[in-house]
Image: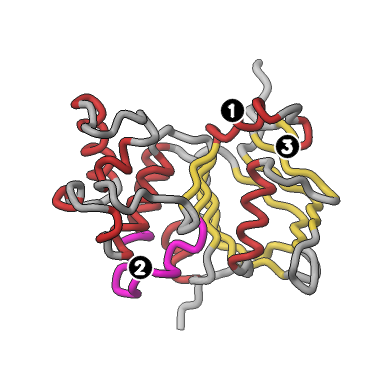
Amino acid sequence: MSAPSPPVLEIKDLQRRYSALRPLRLKSLVIGAGERVAVSGLDAAATELLVNLLTGAGLPEQGEVRILGRSTAEIANGDEWLASLDRFGIVSDRAVLLEGATLAQNLSMPFTLEIDPVPQEIAERVIALADECGIPREWLDRVAGDLPPAVRVRAHLARGIALEPALLIIEHPTATVPPADHAALAASIARIASARRMATLIVTMDRAFGMTAAERMLELHPASGELRPVRKRWW
């Protein structure tokens, strides 16, 4: 009998100081293949730090982060670290879009650097990706600088899933999106991650969003580092 596969993400007793009054602490978080987890209680600075720790761009001062069973501290050199980034899809306003290029050109970039013009076979993949992420096709020929917030976050989502990462990390997806669009975006994330069996970590301050997009909603208690379940209220 083969050994069970390790979790996609495992955090244990993590601690790392940064510019806040207290360090970032996370006692325990495990996300398995296909599981969607939302976490609240991290502001933008703490979220950026957490993403850096998950991707191995930084290391915890205490504790451990393991991706697919391997500690990020075991990454030996810069080339290995760059190769390891393919395991992650990151949906973040910090990600760069080429504002003067069309949305289709931006969505082509995970597949090719030849974007002027976009090769036909890549263009077909871009259309399929846009359809999957709920982006109306009429936006594909518009420059990225013209995208409204609700389309822009879906563009980041499309780029995040393009290369089928092991772990999709979504940073505060509703921060710039009008409230009227929150429910549809949460439903899209849940649908896409479920269909792709993609482990997903969503950091959000919006509990309603998190409960719709994820299977588990957890709240960080910064002093202890505990992640406690958030339960739905029926009143």
Residue located beneath label 1 in the image = 83
Answer with mark 1 or mark 3, whichever residue precedes in sequence: 3
Report the side of 199 relative to 181 (left or right).
right
Mark number displayed over residue 72: 3
Point out residue 61 in the picture as x, y percentages from the top left corner.
84, 51
Residue 132 found in image quarter: top left
Give the residue drawn at x 53%, y 35%: 166
> Tag 1's secondary structure?
helix
Residue farthest left in this picture:
138
Amino acid tagged 1? Ala
Point out residue 160 in the picture as x, y percentages from the top left corner.
43, 43
89 drawn magenta? no
Point out residue 30 in the picture as x, y percentages from the top left corner.
66, 46
Dot 3, crowdedness within 10 Å: few (<14), some or many (≥20)?
Answer: many
Dot 2, crowdedness within 10 Å: few (<14), some or many (≥20)?
Answer: many
Residue located beneath label 2 in the image = 182
178 drawn magenta? yes
Mark number displayed over residue 7: none
Answer with mark 2 or mark 3, whichever residue precedes in sequence: 3
Instruction: Provide the residue span drawn in magenta.
Output: 171-186
Give the residue drawn at x 77%, y 31%: 74
Q: CA distance from mark 2 to mark 1?
A: 34 Å
